[in-house]
Image: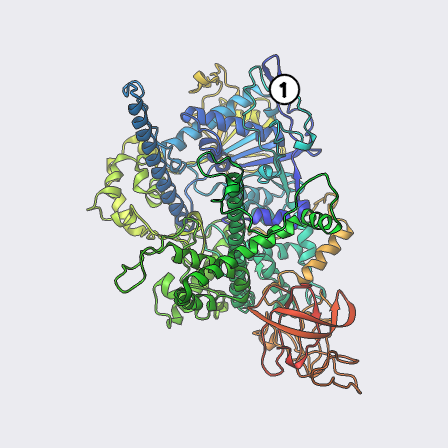
Amino acid sequence: MGVPALFRWLSNKYPKIISSVIEELPQQVDGEEIPVDTTRPNPNGEEMDNLYLDMNGIVHPCTHPEGRPPPANEQEMMLEIFKYTDRVVNMVRPRKLLMIAIDGVAPRAKMNQQRSRRFRSAQEAQENDEKKEELQKLLAKQRAARGEDAVMQEQVVHKTWDSNVITPGTPFMDILAASLRYWIAYKLNTDPAWEKMKIIISDATVPGEGEHKIMEFVRSQRASPEHDPNTRHVIYGLDADLIMLGLGTHEPHFRVLREDVFFQESRPRGCKLCGQAGHKAEECTGRAKEKSGEFDEKQNAVPLKPFIWLHVSVLREYLAAELQVPQQPFPFDLERALDDWVFMCFFVGNDFLPHLPALDVRENGIDTLIAIWRDNIPAMGGYLTEDGQVNFARAQLILQGVAKQEDAIFRRRRQGEERKAANQRRREEQERARNNEHASKRRRSSPNYNGPPRNQGGDDNAPPPGLELITPGRGHLDKETRELTHSMVVNRGAVYRANMENKSAAAVLKSKLMKGSQAEPAAEELAPAESDATDSQAVLGKRKADGEATEKQEEESGTPGRDSPPAPPAKPKENEEPQDTVRLWEPGYADRYYEQKFGVDPEDHEFRHKVARAYAEGLAWVLLYYFQGCPSWTWYYPYHYAPFAADFVDIGDIVLDFNKGQAFKPFEQLMGVLPAASNHALPEVFHDLMSNPESEIIDFYPEDFPVDLNGKKFAWQGVVLLPFIDEKRLLAAMEKKYPLLTEEERLRNTHGREVLLLSDQHPLYQDLAANFYSKKPGPAQYKLNMRVSDGLAGIAERSDTYIPHGSLVSNLEDYGMPSLDDDRTLTVNYSIPKSEHLHKSMLLRGVKFSTPMLNDADVRAVKGRAQHSGRQFGGAPLNGRGRGGRMDYGGGRPNPFAAHLDPRFMNMPQGGQGGPQGGHSGQHGGMPMMPPGWVPPQQGAGDYSRGPPPTPTWVSMVDTRTMAPKTTTAEVATVEVEDEAITKVETVEIVEAVEATDVTRIETLHFECCPFMSIWGIDHGGL
C-alpha cells in the first residue's frame, strides 16, 4: 500500500512490535563456504509453519540494486534472486509450506498507479542514458587533448536496464518463472531441510497482486474445517500493506519479515584518525589495520542488511488497549475494532486512491482519525465495518470530524513549513558566515610577499590608533585583564553566535546608510510580502529576508535612472521550492483547489460531491479487496486528486454495485501501463500503436507529461498527470493485432495457474503419484487430504509439462547451477479452494495465545496516550482537570468532532451538564461558577487578589500546535499543570489562539513556556 513513512511511524509509536532476526550465516573454512544446517532448531526460539514471499520485493532489489553495480545480464540476476531467496528461507526455516507469489495482472484500480510509476521510470532511465553519453563525450575530448588514440579508447555505452520489464507478459517474467521452478526443484533434490516442505509457485501468469494472492490462499485455508488455528505465518515483503493484510486475516500468530530500514542510520561511525570502525577518535590507539581477506579485498564489500520481525500479534495488543473506549454502549469486539483501524488507515494513503489532503502519516493523521473514532463510538452505536462492508452512515461522522479540523491542519502545516524554512535559511547563513570568517583568518595568516608590510600601513585589518591591546608577556596582569580574558574564553560560543546574528542586521544598516533613500522603495516592495507571513515567520526570518533584499540591491549594476535598462529577473535557486498556488492555509483554498486541480467552476459544488462519492466508492472497493478479494477487476477512481473531507455530503445513502468483470490479459495490461520507450517488452506488432502519430490510441502514450508537485518538494512525490486509459478503445485497437501474434506470443498472453512442488520424501508424494501416474489413474481433480498433506487444502491436477523421474535441465550451468539426471520431485497444478462463505472477522476456535509482550505499565501508558493523542489540530475538548478526560458533549459547548450528530444517536445532557462522565456546570459552557464574595481587581492591578479570575472572558486549553498565530500577552491568575494547581501571577505569551463568539471563548492556546498548560481565565485586556 502506498503509505510513505507508515512503517517508521508504527515502529516509533509501538516499539515492541519490532525485534531483530537472529540469523546464522554460512562459514568460510579454508576458502570453502559451509552452508547453514537449517534442519536444526530455529535460532529465533520459535518454529514457523508457513512462509509467504511477495516476490516482487526480492526481484526489484536484486535486478537493479542501490549502492552497488547491477548484475551484468539476466542470468546473473537469476543467481542474485536465488541467493536472496535462499537467505530468507534459511532465516525463517518454514516446516510446512513455502509460497512464492509474483505480481500478475492487477485490477484496473491499481493499473493507474502502475502506469504513472512506469512512465516516470522510463523517463529517469532516458535521463541516465543521456548523462552517460555526455560523460563519454567529455572523456573523449580529454583523451583527444592528451593525444591518445581515440579508437583504442572507444567504449560502449551500456543502456540502463529497463526495470519496466518486471511486468506480467514480458519475456523476462517467463525467464523468471522457469528459473524459479528449476531452482525449487533443485533445492528439493539436494537440501534435506526442504524434504518435508510443500512449495506453491504463483507466477506472473496468475492474475492478481502477489500479496493479495497470498491473502486469498490464507483465507481459503482458514475456511477449511481442519485448519489449525495456531498455524504460525510469516510473510516477507517491502510494502506497508502487508501489516494491514496480516491484521485482516485475524490469524493470531502472524509476522512480517523485512529488511531493517534503519540499518544505515544505526551503523557505527568509524574513527576519523585511522578510518577503522569499532572505536572513536578519542579512543584510537594507532594500531595498524587488519586485512579483510588475503589482499584486503573484502574491505569495501557491501555488508548484508539485517532483517527484523514485525509482530502482528504485538500490534494487536497495542491496538486492543488503544481502541477500547470506556463506557462503550455496546460490547467491545477487538476483531471488529481492528477492521475499523485498517479502514481508517486507507484515508492516509493506499495504492488505489490518493490520500485526503488534510491527512498525512508524518503529521499523525492516523492518531487524528483514532481520536475522532473514539469520540464518535458512543454515538455511532456500532463499528464502521463488518466483514469487509462499510457502514457509510457511520463513516460520514468520521469524515465530518476530519472536516471540522481541515482548516486548522492546513494552517498548522504551513506554520511548520515556514519555521523549517526559516531555520534552514538561518543555518545556511551561519554556515556561510563561518566559512567567510575561516577564509579571512586564512588570508590574514598567510604571508604577503608582494604588498607592503602589515605594520607599515596598507592593511585594513590594522588596529585603529589609540586602542589598548592585551600584549602577552611574562609580567603581571591586572585583575581586569585576567577577568576579561577568562570571560572571553568561557563565553566564546555565545559571543560568536551573537556576532553572527548581528552581522546581517549590520549589513542592512550599512546599506541604508550608504544608499540613503535608495533603499526605501525596496523596503516598500518588501512590505506586502512580509505582511502575508505569520508573526513566527517574521521573527525567525526577518534578518534573512532583509539580507536577501540587500544582496539583490548590491547585485544590480548601472546607475539608477530612467535611462537604465531594467534588471534581469532573478534566477530561481536550485533548492527553491515551486510556488504553491492553491495555498491551502488561506481562506478560499477549496475554490482554488477544484479550479486548478480539476478545472471546474469554483461554484460547482455538485461536482465536489460527485468526486467525494466516487472516493467513498473507492474506500468500499479497497476494503472489500483487502478482506474478501477483488470485488471488481474493472473499477477505478477516475480522478488524480482526492476531495476534501468537507465534501462528503450524504454518503450514507450510497448503494454499491460492483461489476466483477474480468482481468486484463498480460499484453493488455502492458499496453495500459508501459510508455512507448518500453515497447521492447511487447511483441513488435503492437509497437505501431504506441509510436505512430496516426495511431488511434496515440494519445495514451505522451512523450512529455506534466508532474504536479502538489505542494511537495521532490518530483517523485508529485502527481503524474497522465490521461486515463479508455478500456474500450484500447481493447478494440489491440483486437486488430492479435491475429499477427506468433504461437509463443499467444502463450505469453494467457492466464496461468499455480503449481505445487514437493519432494519424494513427503507423504503427499505417494498419494499424488498413485492418483495421476499409476496404471489405474484416479480423478483428474484430486482433493488433497489435509492429514496427509500436513494441513494443505486444495485441488491438485496433473501437469502436462511434468515427466516423472525425468531430468532437471538447467540454463545456468555456466554459472554453477548444474542439471540433474534424476529429478525426484513432483509438480502438479494447484487450485486454491473456493469458499462459499464470507471471510469472517473473528478468531477461530482453539486459538492459543502467546505470552503477552505488553505488561500492565505498557497497557496503562497506551490507554493514557489514547485519551489525548490525535488532537493537535483543535481536537475535542476534555473534561475534568488537566489532560486525559473524555469528550464533553454537553454544556452547550460546540463539539469539534460530533456537533453534526443527529440527536437521535444519543440523549444530549440538559442544563449544561457534562457528557458521559459528567462535566463542569455553569453558564459559561461547562466552566465552574464564581464563588460568592469574589472581588475583581482594580483596573491595572498587577494581580487578581484572591479567588478565581473574572467571568467575562474564558479560556479552555486542550492541546497545543493548532490555530493560526496571534501573539498577545495575558496575565494569568490560576495555572493548572498536570492536575496540580499553581496560584501565581504570571505573564505568558500566547502564541496561538482563536476567539469564539458570544462569551469570547478561546478554543485552543499554545504557550512557549509549557505546551500543556490548562488556563482557567485571563484578564479583560489580555486579548
Q: Residue at x 63, y 50 (%)?
A: 468
Q: Nearer the viewer, residue 880 or 257?
A: 880
| Quadrant of the image occupied by residue 26 | top right
Q: How many marks?
A: 1
Percent position (x, y) of residue 845? 69, 47
The amino acid at mark 1 is Glu
Is residue 279 placed above or below 31 in the rendered structure?
below
Q: How is the image coloured?
A: rainbow
| Mark 1: secondary structure | loop
Q: Which residue is mark 1?
A: 290
How far across and how far down the image is residue 633, in percent?
A: 41, 50
Q: Residue at x 52, y 46 (%)?
A: 461
Q: Is residue 156 above or below residue 571?
A: above
Query: In terms of depth relative to the viewer, which is nearer, 58 or 367?
Result: 367
Q: Nearer the viewer, residue 399 or 290?
A: 290
Q: Is residue 580 left or right of residue 501?
A: left
Q: Nearer the viewer, residue 573 or 125?
A: 573
